[in-house]
Image: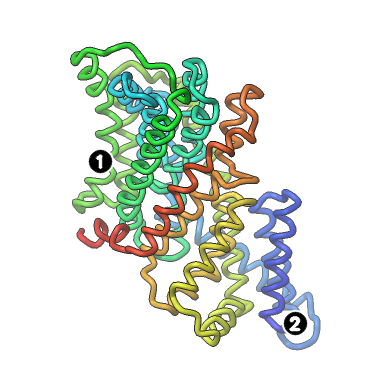
Amino acid sequence: MDGTLVGIVAFCAVIGLLAIRVPIAFALAGVATAGSFVMFAFRTGDFTPLRALRPTTSMVFSNSFDLIHSYDLSMIPLFVALGHIAYRADITTKIYHAARVWLARVPGGVAMASVMGCGGFSAITGSSIACASTMGRICSPEMLRMGYDPRLATSSVAAGGTLGSLIPPSVLFIIYGIFTETSISQLFLAGILPGLLSLAGFILVIWVWVRRDPAAAPALGEETTLAERGRAAWEAWPAVALFAIIVGGIYGGIFTATEAAAVCVTAATLIGFAQRKLSFPALWEALRETAIQTASIFFIAASAKIFVAFIALTGVAPDIVAAVTAAQLSPVVLMLSIAAIYLVLGMFLDPIGIMVLTLPLMIPLVETYGFDLIWFGVVVIKLLEIGLITPPVGLNVFVIANVVGPSVAIERIFSGILRFLTVDVLVLLAIMAFPVISLLIPYSM
């Protein structure tokens, strides 16, 4: 049986299952298992299902076992736990409160502080959706109460939440590193400058928005003294310290990414208890939520690993590489085509699903063209980040809509998001045109 045909049918089947809302893990594992069974059954030319049973089960279980026992994968529960513990210890929101105090008299200052708070939250949690959900509960209702334009009050947090995908640590970077066998530490460092560039772009959007329409942010906070600003900045030191451990430790060669995660979890727990912001019931709840979230991610990753093995069995990836090579596409056209594919998929699928579905085909292709996989990883994560706020299914937008309730229609949130999407696209083009933005820090280690 033609392996390429089986592979193409399998991809269409996965897309179809996802379209009818079958969970990504079940879709990938189910299609990969069925496809592998068909490939093994027809290996000798005749359909012999009994002969296909053993190799199919062996492939499924061996790939799942190898992935789950991967050392690098241990970073995911550690960073997920760090986010939950830091939130309950009131560490992640201190950067927002500090920025809120410092920008109290700046027009649009609360919206800017919200974006900065999302950046600080992202520097610890590594999850965009968690960032949007948590910061949305804190920031959006406050801005609505102060009289902010509902579009600005909601879209700024939805856009700021996407920073969790790019600013290290990032769960998406971990999954990308595992499946492409690239250095996760270098991926973390590669995301710093693009993440900060995105954050600065969002703040610029708010500044221009309020400057053109002062009524969008009418309320100014009370004047704060220098002592109050200093106290607010000092209270944010735990978040800064945790970020410094992650980035400084990895850049300085003191820690691996996994060791940095373990150290930060310990530090966040000790800081929380020392400041009497964390209790044992809260710690238990954080660990319980960590276990649930980690199990979900592991299930998806294991299913994706089975799917990758199936794609290798079909040989569809080399055929696609050969077809693209024969077409003699220029590197620019190839990257623009890849970007278009990710942007379209981002309108309908979640980031992890897009990544595990496309990487088995994209990585052999970009390696043939000699692209740097660290740089390509940043481009992919940025594209997935854009997908989180792209209509009609921008996950972060729906998270914020759920937080604010019927007071702000989802169409109004999307109308505000368009301004931030413009900056996102400009940052994406800059990253693609100037790889040094992504590679400067990791390759200076």
Q: Amino acid at mark 1?
A: Ile
Instruction: Please tell me in which quadrant of the rendered image residue 122 appears.
Output: top left
Asked if one can make out residue 420 in the rendered structure from this viewpoint, the answer is yes
- What percent of the width, then of the height, locates residue 83? 42, 34
Tell us which disc is closer to us: 2 or 1. 1
Label 1, residues with CA under 10 Å away: few <14, some 14-19, many ≥20? many
Q: Residue at x 69, y 57 (%)?
A: 27
Asked if one can make out residue 53 in the rendered structure from this viewpoint, the answer is no
> Left or right: where does residue 327 sit relative to residue 269?
right
The number of discs equals 2
Q: Earlier in the sequence, mark 2 or mark 1?
A: 2
- What percent of the width, then of the height, locates residue 145? 50, 15
Looking at the rendered structure, which numbered label has been put on residue 193?
none
Question: In the current view of this chain or complex, which residue is farthest to the right?
Answer: 47
Q: Which residue does the numbered mark 1 point to in the structure image?
A: 245
Say which of 415 and 403 sits in front: 415
**Dots 2 and 1: beta carbons under 8 Å?**
no
> Left or right: where does residue 367 sit relative to residue 394?
left
Q: Which residue does the numbered mark 2 point to in the structure image?
A: 42
